[in-house]
Structures are given as C-alpha cells and as structure tokens.
Amino acid sequence: MKSEARIEDLLREMAPQVLGALVRRYGQFEACEDAVQEALLAAAIQWPNQGLPDHPRAWLTAVASRRLADQWRSEHSRRRREVTVAAMVPADESVTAGPDVPPTQRDDTLTLLFMCCHPALSPPSQVALTLRAVGGLTTAQIAAAFLVPEATMTQRIGRAKQRIKATGIPFRMPPPSEWDDRLRVVLHVLYLIFNEGYTASSGPDLQRSELTGEAIRLTRAVRRLLPDHDEVAGLLALMLLTDARRHARTGPDGALIPLADQDRSLWHAASIKEGLALVTRTLASGPVGPYQIEAAIAAVHTEAPDAQDTDWPQIVALYDLLKHLSPSPMVSLNHAVAVAMAQGPKAGLDLLKTLDADDRMAGHHRLDAVRAHLLETAGEPAAAQVCYRRAARRTTSLPERRYLDARAARLAGADG
C-alpha cells in the first residue's frame, strides 16, 4: 500500500510537468491533456508490478508523446496538426529554464498554472482546470469536491479547454507588464481551492482534505519557482497555519468545534513551525500584502496557548491594515469579530450594522451567525436565538447547520 501511495503522489507531482512539456512542444492543450491522462493511467497500472523506471518523468513524456502520435496518424488529424503547428508562435522557454536544459527536465508548472488561470477563463473554470491539469485530480474527484454531477464538471472543463483553443492562449509566461495581475489570479485561485477544502460550502462534511492538500501542494510548487516572492510565501504560511487546526475542528461524530473550544494539543506542530517561520521571514523583508497579513493573523491565534490569551488588540490592528489593503465584506465581518473580542460585543454589533446594506452579504449565513454569537455574548438570548435559526436555514453545510441549530436549541432550553 505504501508503494502504491508513493506512486500516486509521484504521478500527481509529475503530471503538470509532463503536460507543460507537451503543450510547450506541440501546442493543442486539450489533446496533450488527454494524452497525459492516458500515460498516467498506464503508469498506475504498470509501475506497481514492474517497478519505477529509472527516469519516471521521461517515461511519462515518451508514453504521452506516443499517444499523441497515434492520435495524429490519421490523415484528417495530420492535416489538423499541420495547420496548428504552422500557426503556433514559439513559446518563450527561457522564463523557467535555460535553453540548454533538456525538455524532459524543464518544470513548466508555473507556466501551466498561468494558462489555467488566464483572465479569459471564468473563475469557476480557472479553479476546475487548475485542479485537473495542475493538481492531477480526475474529473470525478473535482465534481465530488464541489458537489456537482460529473457530467456538469466535464462540461465546465471542456468549455475551459475550448476557450483556450478559441482565444489562442499561448503556452508561455505573460509579459512583464501583466506579471503582477496574472500572479494575483493564480494565488487567488489557490486561495479559493484551499478555502473550499477547509470549510466546504455545502454537503455533509465540514472540510475536504483532498482540496486543502492540493492547494498547499500547488502553492509549494509556485514557491519553489518563485522563492523570493513574499506574497507566495505569505499564502503558503496562511494555509499551513490554518490547516494545522484541521484535526481539532470536528469531534468524533463530525460535529463542528469552534476555534475557542478546540483542543490546541491536536494542532499540527510541524505545520505551525513552518508557517510561523515563513511569517517571520516575509514580514521582515519589506512591504506586506494581504496574504501576509492574513498569515500574521493566523500566527497570532496559533501563538496563544489558549483562546483567553489571544492578543485581540493586535488582531484588530492587523484587520485594520487588511481592510486598507484588500477591502471586502468578509474582511469587515472578521474585523467586527475581532473588535468585539477586544472591546466588547456592543462594539462588534455596531460594526455589523454597516454590513446590512451590503448586497454581497444579503442572505449570507455568516453575517447572521456572527450577529447571533455577539448577541448571545451581550446577554440577549432571544434575539440571538432568532439569528442562529436564520443562519442555520441559510447555510448549505450540514455540520454548520447542526452547530447553529444546537446553539439555538440551547438558548431555547435556557429560556425554558
């Protein structure tokens, strides 16, 4: 079993590298992606019995290339290939590797990430295509993670591939003028994938470790290629410090356990150590970005021996900075929680009023859930009960719904 798990991890790691090499060499993203999937399947069948080849990546590249050659053997496919190759613009291969590096040794992961996160694609397509092409997840796995039928996800990924073909998105790094904006999209997609895994938006489970694991693995890949980029390091630190709490977030029955009630001895020490080191290093190196600030907030929580010792004034100050750098209703909501913890529930409730008129928060269960908690803390159980019930009706996450209903029921019992 260990050997098979090792092979699975190796295939997942090498999949984007092999796909990148093929797309750079041949173009035709969709055909190359299909060929790589067939090569991965062949490896999954052969390697456990025959052993790993001396050069696994070169083996996969050769098998995938043969699959392409087989596909292009017919006259119609050959004509289509000739037209495509004639129209191709040579990719700039000097961005991620020197010209003397053999094609099978180049790492095109970053280039592939930029292609999957191209602004011509919709955000849902960016996420789905990134998980498929770079994360190595099957269409069925992605569909299960986002709780949609496999046919729906197949269509979504298919549309993304067709969009790449129709718009002629080249397989190369963007020009320097687009670098910051495009990297921002890449990091945002990885952030979305992690968040969906950490707190699933719907379904029976609170978290989906396959998504958080992929987001962390892909962010590590970006950091290997951009080791001096502080926001990449900040995002990785945020993920590590947040994911470190995973085993303490649910009870044996899968019930949600809020941060204040978690057994911190269950937090993953190695992830915390690595995350804190990244935060310390990036905050000291110069101007900070939103992911570094979020990582710093997670670090403050992590460094507190228990919930009562949390440095809430420092968290308030960090949220003040985050609101300036990257304003959003969710940042404002979390800021209100921090203010309530530092200055009392009334101060937090006053801040929540500013979100009531925000259309982006209309009907969102988290606003009701936070208001319920602050009302309960402020000694208004009847009003809190109403908000808990409303939040429970609005969430599509079963663990969250059960938690909110339980809070409401407890208040109802206290009143009785």
Image (cartoon, rainbow, N blue to C red):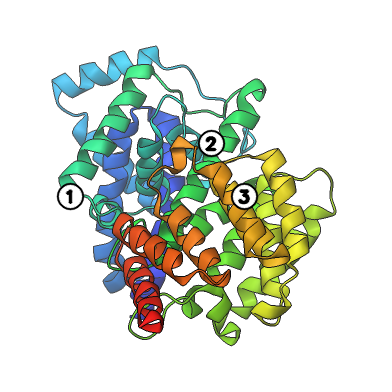
Q: Does label 2 or label 3 sit earlier along the sequence? A: 2
Q: Residue at x 50, y 20 (%)?
A: 90
**Neighbours of disc 1 within 10 Å: few (<14), some (14-19), many (20+):** few
Q: In the drawing, what numbered circle is on residue 128?
A: none
Tell me, yes or no, if residue 173 can be seen here.
yes
**Neighbours of disc 2 within 10 Å: few (<14), some (14-19), many (20+):** some
Which kind of residue does numbered mark 1 sit on? Answer: Pro
Q: Which quarter of the rendered picture does the N terminus lie within?
A: bottom left
Residue on which disc 2 sits: 185
**Neighbours of disc 3 within 10 Å: few (<14), some (14-19), many (20+):** some
Disc 1/disc 3 C-alpha distance (Å): 40 Å
Q: Mark 2 vs mark 3: give the one in front.
A: 3
Q: Residue at x 25, y 52 (%)?
A: 143
Which kind of residue does numbered mark 2 sit on? Answer: Val
Q: Is residue 330 left or right of residue 71?
A: right
> Does residue 196 sit above or below 413 in this rendering?
above
Q: Is residue 382 left or right of residue 327?
A: left
Which one is in front, 82 or 263?
A: 263
Which one is in front, 381 or 187?
A: 381
Looking at the rendering, which quadrant does residue 176 occupy?
Answer: top right
Q: Mark 1 vs mark 3: give the one in front.
A: 3
Residue on which disc 1 sits: 149
Q: Secondary structure at mark 3?
A: helix
The percent coordinates of residue 389 (x first, y second) are: 34, 64
The percent coordinates of residue 226 (x first, y second) are: 67, 45
Tag 1–tag 3 contact (CB < 8 Å)? no
Q: Is residue 272 left or right of residue 89?
A: right
Q: Secondary structure at mark 2?
A: helix
